[in-house]
């Protein structure tokens, strides 16, 4: 065990409960889990282990290196970015590519690669073969487990959602795919018509809430930081770079082992909050690379070596900081110890 002055308090029960809620919202479809970017920053192996024990059978990563890191867990992993020539020689068992381009399809066919998934573009113009490619026979002869697409605006009420769903539904029976999959976290909340055979939640597993149906989603991640120094600052003195904070009166300040190198970015300067025993402790001055100052007038017993938690509920913190819920999670740095309870 390491002894970092930073740790992430990770609620394993909340993670599993979130998956179960999303499964119940999937209208009978299987419910998978996106665990790319190292489980959205939490640690993919521990996320996969807990969700597999709860009954999750389909996991999604971006790169083959992520699939290799999970290979010994014996779960089914789909690699969303497909397969490059250099990926062909080192593909773990239980993993398959999500073929995204005609070139990838032809490469896979030429290799006799076996079972695969395929991404089709229904209007996002990001990744995927086109419906016209499918009509022209591009996928003929492929052994496809899942045909999937991705919603561009599932967290918004826009006509594009239904256009994408309609375009995707029109592909039913047009390929050899055993299953069809469209809905991400927000897409699950759009209703039964979006569920198809398999849903692929990501951010909501980890505490993200995008729609009213997500109201039962629980927070999974709470960053905690250790106090490096407590000091008194006299009225009229400044705290931190560029003197952005000047004490209006004598103030007690704690300096945390935390900064933007850890993903606690400068946008939290003068906005963020720490807590100790429920007491709010506002961030003051400018967040720097490795240090953040908080006012501890309301916590007279806090001192060097004590721990505080950071307010980090994803929807509220996104609104406060201007960062997306995704950035808030995936930006949390490697210096945090990740501790599950």
Image (spheres, helix red, strand yellow):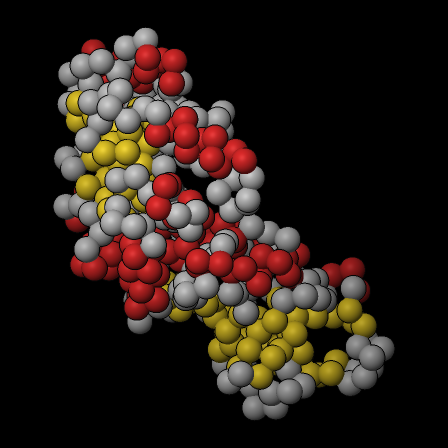
- Residue at image position (41%, 65%) is 216
* 66 vs 177, nearest the viewer: 177
In the drawing, does residue 165 fall left or right of residue 231?
left
Q: Quadrant of the C terminus?
A: bottom left
Q: Quadrant of the N terminus?
A: bottom left
- Residue at image position (50%, 73%) is 309
* Image quadrant where residue 339 sits: bottom left
Q: Is residue 79 visible?
A: no
Q: Locate residue 179, reporting x and y percent.
A: 23, 34
- Residue at image position (62%, 58%) is 319
Residue sticking out furthest to the right: 236
**Number of marks:** 0
In the drawing, does residue 296 fall left or right of residue 215?
right
In the rendered image, the vertical position of residue 185 relative to residue 209, given as above or below:
above
Q: Locate residue 277, reporting x and y percent.
A: 51, 85
* Image quadrant where residue 54 sits: bottom left
* 28 vs 227, nearest the viewer: 28
């Amino acid at each position: 065990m390491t002894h970092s002055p930073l740790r992430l308090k990770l609620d394993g029960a909340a993670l599993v409960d979130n998956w179960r809620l999303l499964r119940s919202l999937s209208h009978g479809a299987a419910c998978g889990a996106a665990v790319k970017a190292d489980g959205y920053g939490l640690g993919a192996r521990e996320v996969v282990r807990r969700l597999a024990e709860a009954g999750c059978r389909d996991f999604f990563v971006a790169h083959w290196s992520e699939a290799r890191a999970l290979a010994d867990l014996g779960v089914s992993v789909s690699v969303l970015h497909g397969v490059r020539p250099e990926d062909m020689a080192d593909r773990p068992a239980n993993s398959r590519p999500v073929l995204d381009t005609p070139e990838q399809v032809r490469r896979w066919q030429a290799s006799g690669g076996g079972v695969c998934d395929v991404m089709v573009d229904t209007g996002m113009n990001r990744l995927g073969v086109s419906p016209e490619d499918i009509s022209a026979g591009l996928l003929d002869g492929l052994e496809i487990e899942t045909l999937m697409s991705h919603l561009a605006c599932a967290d918004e009420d826009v006509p594009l959602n239904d256009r994408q769903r309609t375009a995707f539904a029109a592909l039913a029976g047009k390929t050899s795919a055993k299953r069809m999959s469209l809905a991400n976290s927000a897409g699950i909340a759009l209703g039964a018509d979006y569920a198809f055979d398999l849903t692929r939640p990501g951010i909501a597993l980890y505490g993200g809430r995008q729609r009213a149906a997500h109201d039962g989603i629980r927070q999974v991640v709470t960053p905690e930081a250790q106090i490096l120094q407590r000091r008194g600052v006299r009225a009229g003195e400044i705290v931190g770079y560029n003197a952005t904070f000047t004490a209006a009166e004598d103030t007690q300040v704690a300096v945390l082992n935390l900064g933007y190198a850890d993903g606690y970015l400068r946008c939290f300067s003068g906005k963020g909050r720490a807590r100790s025993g429920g007491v709010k402790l506002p961030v003051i001055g400018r967040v720097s690379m490795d240090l953040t100052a908080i006012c501890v007038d309301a916590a007279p017993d806090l001192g060097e070596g004590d721990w505080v938690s950071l307010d980090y509920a994803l929807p509220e913190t996104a609104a406060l900081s201007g960062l997306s819920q995704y950035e808030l999670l995936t930006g949390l740095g490697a210096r945090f110890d990740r501790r599950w309870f």
